[in-house]
């Protein structure tokens, strides 16, 4: 059995047609989701590039990996997905954005910082190293490679060449990660550069409710962002066609994920790093052997579960040091091994540390004061966010300081401290807001999700 992880950067959950988007951005992904297994409420465990990627490659939370902000590399002692696949006879390849190398992150990624991947065509920070029509990566020998075409097309083309090559050696299974930069913004000029002219097709299209209400940079950036996603989906379709034409489709699992979402400067001064759905909720689709016909799942699912899930699907033992859970049993209706809620960490060198829990009904988050900015964790947090996702899916009404919702917060506070303890975070205190406002409405008890 082979694996292809198709990995986008900064893609919102609500850009998918299967999640209700009517703009026709993701027809190929929607088809895979309907044929395979779709985790409708999947989240990132840390809504920023490097930390999220560390969780993906280790099956551990960012405070455990040590990559709780952009910059540090993976610890030598952390379990590494590629090394575990290598040991089981797989050929492993990585194409695109890495963002897990020590230091400045420019130039070639040293061999020791590549997480064990054998075949390599990547850069640490693609958004700095290249432009939309100048994809610049480095190969296994640290030789610079310029790929022709629009950047996401160019990387998909490289993946297609890799798959064609692997199809000629069927005795050795493979795992390929295709890590696109798009639809992440271009850091060098803070833009969302779509293929020339494509953004015109989306100018004036309806914004999601949070962007309608809060604005941010969406008036400038939404059309380009949508066009980038449409081009990505076209590339996914070409990659699936390649698997079909090379007769690899029946033996290959495709996983589609993104590292985090994008709130377009509505929740803070940039695009992510917040506990809101726009930052933390992501696409997650599995398709192929063992996953076809799994259906739509609303159970807690996180990027920290990807590594153990891939190992379980391949029949490889999951290290006990991994903190995520395999999602494979959900395809046969087994959910007892999963937690009741998704747990995420947020905050890095730019933002104060925070923690959140999410169920299908509620989002609860706590944040440390600014004195702990630049720290991985804090001894004291304050309750800062509570949203009823059932009535307010775009989190426009914060209920954290409303007296009627105190029972909900009380239950979440206890559970959040338990989750933090489970992954060996330092002991912390969570304080209630200084001012609680009565609303004269019924009391809301903690419900079943």
Image (spheres, helix red, strand yellow):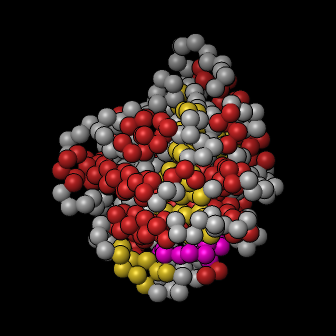
Q: Is residue 252 visible from the viewing direction of this image? A: yes
Q: How many marks?
A: 0
Q: Nearer the viewer, residue 58 or 167?
A: 167
Residue 73 position, x and y percent, is 62, 72
Residue 359 position, x and y percent, is 61, 32
Left or right of 260 on screen, residue 88: right
Q: Residue at x 39, y 32 (%)?
A: 20
Q: Is residue 267 visible from the viewing direction of this image? A: no
Q: Nearer the viewer, residue 24 or 47?
A: 24
Residue 415 position, x and y percent, is 73, 36
Magenta-colored span: 113-123
Is residue 276 within the magenta segment?
A: no
Q: Residue at x 40, y 81 (%)?
A: 145
Left or right of 104 on screen, residue 76: right
Q: Which quarter of the figure has residue 15?
A: top left
Residue 416 position, x and y percent, is 71, 40
Q: In the picture, which quadrant includes the N terminus?
A: bottom right
Which residue, as the protein is rendered here, is positioned at the far right?
A: 320
- In the image, residue 147 sits, relative to residue 399, either above or below, namely below
Q: Residue at x 47, y 42 (%)?
A: 32
Q: Nearer the viewer, residue 179 or 175?
A: 175
Q: In the picture, which quadrant includes the C terminus?
A: top right
Q: Residue at x 21, y 54 (%)?
A: 198
């Amino acid at each position: 059995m082979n694996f292809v992880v198709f990995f986008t950067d900064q893609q919102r959950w609500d850009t998918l047609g299967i999640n209700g988007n009517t703009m026709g951005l993701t027809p190929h992904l929607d088809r895979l989701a309907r044929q395979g297994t779709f985790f409708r409420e999947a989240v990132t465990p840390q809504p920023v590039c490097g930390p999220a990627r560390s969780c993906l490659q280790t099956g551990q939370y960012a405070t455990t990996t040590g990559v709780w902000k952009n910059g540090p590399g993976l610890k030598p002692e952390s379990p590494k997905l590629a090394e575990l696949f290598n040991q089981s006879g797989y050929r492993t390849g990585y194409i695109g954005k890495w963002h897990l190398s020590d230091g400045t992150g420019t130039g070639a990624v040293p061999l020791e910082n590549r997480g064990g991947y054998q075949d390599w065509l990547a850069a640490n920070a693609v958004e700095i190293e290249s432009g939309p029509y100048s994809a610049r990566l480095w190969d296994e020998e640290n030789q610079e490679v310029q790929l022709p075409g629009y950047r996401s097309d160019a990387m998909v083309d490289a993946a297609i060449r890799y798959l064609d090559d692997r199809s000629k050696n069927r005795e050795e299974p493979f795992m390929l990660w295709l890590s696109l930069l798009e639809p992440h913004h271009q850091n060098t000029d803070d833009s969302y550069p779509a293929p020339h002219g494509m953004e015109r097709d989306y100018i004036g299209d309806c914004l999601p409710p949070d962007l309608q209400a809060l604005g941010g940079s969406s008036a400038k950036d939404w059309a380009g962002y949508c066009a980038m996603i449409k081009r990505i989906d076209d590339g996914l379709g070409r990659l699936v066609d390649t698997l079909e034409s090379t007769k690899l489709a029946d033996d290959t699992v495709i996983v589609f994920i993104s590292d985090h979402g994008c709130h377009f400067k509505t929740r803070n001064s940039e695009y992510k790093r917040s506990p809101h759905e726009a930052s933390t909720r992501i696409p997650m689709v599995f398709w192929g052997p063992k996953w076809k016909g799994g259906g739509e799942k609303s159970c807690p699912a996180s990027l920290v579960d990807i590594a153990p899930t891939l190992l379980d699907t391949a029949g490889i033992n999951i290290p006990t040091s991994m903190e995520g859970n395999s999602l494979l049993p959900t395809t046969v209706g087994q959910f007892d091994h999963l937690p009741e809620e998704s747990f995420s960490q947020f905050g890095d060198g730019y933002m104060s540390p925070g923690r959140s829990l999410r169920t299908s009904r509620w989002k609860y988050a706590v944040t440390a004061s600014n004195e702990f900015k630049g720290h991985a964790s804090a001894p004291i947090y304050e309750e800062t966010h509570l949203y009823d996702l059932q009535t307010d899916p775009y989190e426009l009404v914060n209920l954290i300081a409303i007296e009627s919702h105190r029972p909900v917060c009380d239950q979440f506070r206890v559970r959040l401290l338990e989750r933090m303890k489970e992954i060996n975070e330092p002991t912390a205190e969570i304080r209630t807001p200084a001012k609680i406002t009565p609303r004269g409405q019924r009391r809301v008890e903690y419900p079943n999700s």
